[in-house]
Amino acid sequence: DAGITQSPRHKVTETGTPVTLRCHQTENHRYMYWYRQDPGHGLRLIHYSYGVKDTDKGEVSDGYSVSRSKTEDFLLTLESATSSQTSVYFCAIKPATNEKLFFGSGTQLSVL
Amino acid sequence: AQSVSQHNHHVILSEAASLELGCNYSYGGTVNLFWYVQYPGQHLQLLLKYFSGDPLVKGIKGFEAEFIKSKFSFNLRKPSVQWSDTAEYFCAVNERAAGNKLTFGGGTRVLVKP
């Protein structure tokens, strides 16, 4: 695999609490992405980054924020978790334009 | 905004049957096209990709896909499936003008019965 680690792998939290998911890569790739996977919706892009401190919104960014202070780490924060954010979250990395994505193993988040 | 449509949500077939999964996208510009596969309990892996050149692309595990620009389609095929092909398959499109955002279809769950 492409040296991507997501943490935690599983998390259960309560509505209204903040949650931070971490994606760590060892490949020094420029592009990093956060997707959520839900039945019938495939993968939907939440936020992505094209370099340190350079981030942009995806199609489902409401309720999420991200930070990338180092090349290797891309953090996804749910500012105040809601039940609709129960999902599997995948981080992905890409070395350059016109390259494939490499995916992490996912984080199963349940918001009760 | 571009969209990616996968027509079948679930497909059930027997071993040795042929498989074809449809994928259509809405964007009319230059695109990069991908098929990813997710085996049960695993993360997504690339099956094949098309950037340019021969519109018939061969991928891993006997899969191929054909890009038909006039139909905005990139259908995935395999002539003879195996039980191990049971997985969820995702089509994805990257508009080159949109930079590095990849849009996925809703996925097709394929169950191959032994």
Image (cartoon, rainbow, N blue to C red):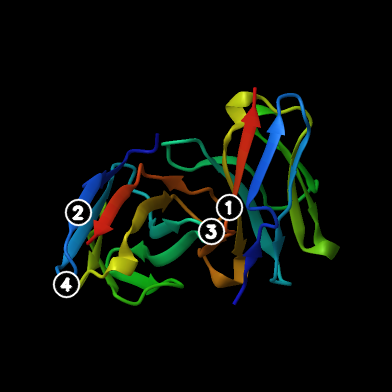
Amino acid of disc 2: Val
Which of the pair A39/B106 is nearer the observer?
A: A39
Give the Cα distance between marks 2 and 3.
23 Å
Query: Residue A16: which disc?
Result: 4
**Foreground of the two, A98 or A21:** A21
Q: Which residue is mark 2?
A: A12
The mark found on residue A99 in the picture is none
Asked if badge 2 and badge 1 are on a common chain, one would say no
For the residue marked with disc 1, what is the amino acid? Gly
Front residue of A23/B42: it is B42
**Which mark is in front, 2 or 1?**
2
Q: What amino acid is found at the position of numbered circle 4 in the picture?
A: Gly
User: Which residue in the structure is indicated by mark 3?
Assistant: A40
Q: Residue at x 35, y 42 (%)?
A: A105
Q: Are marks 1 and 4 in contact (CB under 8 Å)?
A: no
Label whose residue precedes the other's in the sequence (2 or 3)? 2
The alpha-carbon separation of the residues under discs 2 and 1 comes to 26 Å
The reply to whether discs 3 and 1 touch (Cβ–Cβ < 8 Å) is yes
- Above-or-below relation of B99 to B107: below
Q: Label 1, secondary structure: give it.
A: loop
Q: Is the same chain shared between marks 3 and 1?
A: no
Q: Residue furthest right?
A: B70
Question: Mark 2 vs mark 4: same chain?
Answer: yes
Q: Label 1: which residue?
A: B107
Q: Secondary structure at mark 4?
A: loop
Whether residues under marks 2 and 4 lie with C-beta atoms below 8 angstroms apart, the answer is no
Which chain letter matches label 4? Answer: A
**Is there any visible trace of residue A12 in the rendered image?**
yes
Characterize the local packing of mark 3: few (<14), some (14-19) or many (20 or more) Cα atoms within 10 angstroms: few
Left-right relation of B57 to A18? right
Q: Position of residue B57 (x, y in %)?
A: 74, 41
